[in-house]
Amino acid sequence: MKVPVNEPVIADGAKKYVLDALETGWISSAGKYISLFEETFAAFIDVKHAITVTSGTSALHLALTSLNIGKGDEVILPDFTMIACLDAVLYTGATPVFVDVDPETYCIDTDQIASKITDRTKAIMPVHIYGHSADMDPILVLAEKHNLYVIEDAAEVHGGTYKGKKCGGIGTVGCFSFYGNKIISTGEGGMLVTNDDEIAARARSLKDLAHDSNKRFWHKEVGYNYRMTNMQAALGLGQTESVDTFLAHKKWMASNYTSQLKDIDGLRLPITKDYAENVYWMYGILVENSFPLTKDELRSALQEKGVDTRDFFYSISSMPIADPYRTDDKYPVTQDISKRGFYLPSGLALTEEQLTYVCDVIKEIATS
Ligand SMILES: *Cc1c(COP(=O)(O)O)cnc(C)c1O
């Protein structure tokens, strides 16, 4: 049997909308699906404004520029995250400041943020990793105290909540990705969400080349083309309308994996805090010393049986592109989990037969 690490599901409604977008000829970034998708997504996250963009990376960059963050400013972000977070900060010329993560949730360790705040700090960028919310309240308290923006990277947490509030809609700005492996996908795409009218207006202008508001084709500021197409928005609308089914599948997947794997010695399964409703974007596990194989050995043994898996992220501060910003600070949790962690097949198309096969293979490896 072959089990891919991720296989998407395209809802029938989404296919119908995409065909409609094609048949009406509205293939570029004007057309009804853009506003329909934005309105539907805003309602889903319970925010005032949702603004389509070309990717999660461009959403993060647009968030930073809309908040006028640039050279000389500092942005605090977790060391354990996807590289797009660091890239977006570097595009603006701002300085990234890395913070280690919580050993249970893999999200930014809120006890370590205060000591990294300086006069130059402008924003904190918590990342909700693998579907689990960061601990937002301590972050909001620090942001309030030091007058900082909070930019949530919600690329992996569509529909997940923190104390009952949808992730992405809690900070100043939230950024979503709609890449093919995300819970809602548009192929490639992203969304910036906010409750702030001024930030929303600025983001809308900057994502469309920053035309002067009184004189179109006149530019006082450098803008970007981060416009999503109507075809992608049609796909996004259809997928958002099916999100309850997708989230139910993720919940089913996690509880099934957990019940089949919980008795294996040496595997640490995902931990969900009381404050979070985990949407299990990916089912990540840690290989402990008591497991008979190392992580790399376990992953190759799974690969031999047709089971595709992915390593956890590397520490972003250890990347060559972070050389100019590295300090003497250490990030032991990130170093540790990136050595021992990987995720199991977690796609929306994963069947019960495939899931049980994956667990059977792991059990066989663990006892041989
Ligand atoms: C996927 C992802 C992104 C980037 O999104 P793209 O749409 O691929 O640009 C950013 N942050 C996190 C945490 C992600 O998982």
Image (spheres, rainbow, N blue to C red):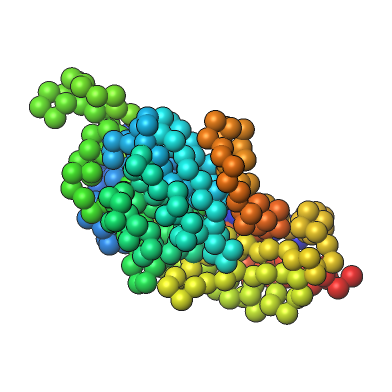
Labels in figure, total? 0
- In the picture, measured across the screen, residue 188 lies left or right of residue 358, that is left
Locate residue 293: give its quadrant: bottom right
Residue 152 at what x, y percent from top left? 39, 52
Asked whether residue 176 appears in the rendered view, the answer is no
Q: Which residue is drawn at 29% across and 27% down?
A: 223
Residue nearest the viewer, comparing 337 with 332: 332
Residue 80 at what x, y percent from top left? 56, 51
- In the picture, measured across the screen, residue 83 lies left or right of residue 177, that is right
Residue 129 at what x, y percent from top left? 51, 57
Residue nearest the viewer, comparing 210 with 76: 76
Image quadrant holding the N terminus, namely: bottom right
Locate residue 62: give its quadrant: top left
Q: Which residue is drawn at 67% across and 69% down?
A: 268
Residue nearest the viewer, comparing 66 with 211: 66
Residue 161 at what x, y percent from top left? 39, 67
Give the farthest residue toward the right.
368
- In the picture, measured across the screen, residue 169 lies left or right of residue 55, that is left
Locate residue 294: give its quadrant: bottom right
Task: Say above or below: 342 vs 199.
Answer: below
Image quadrant holding the C terminus, namely: bottom right
Q: Residue at x 73, y 79 (%)?
A: 263
Q: Which residue is drawn at 46% across and 39% down?
A: 96
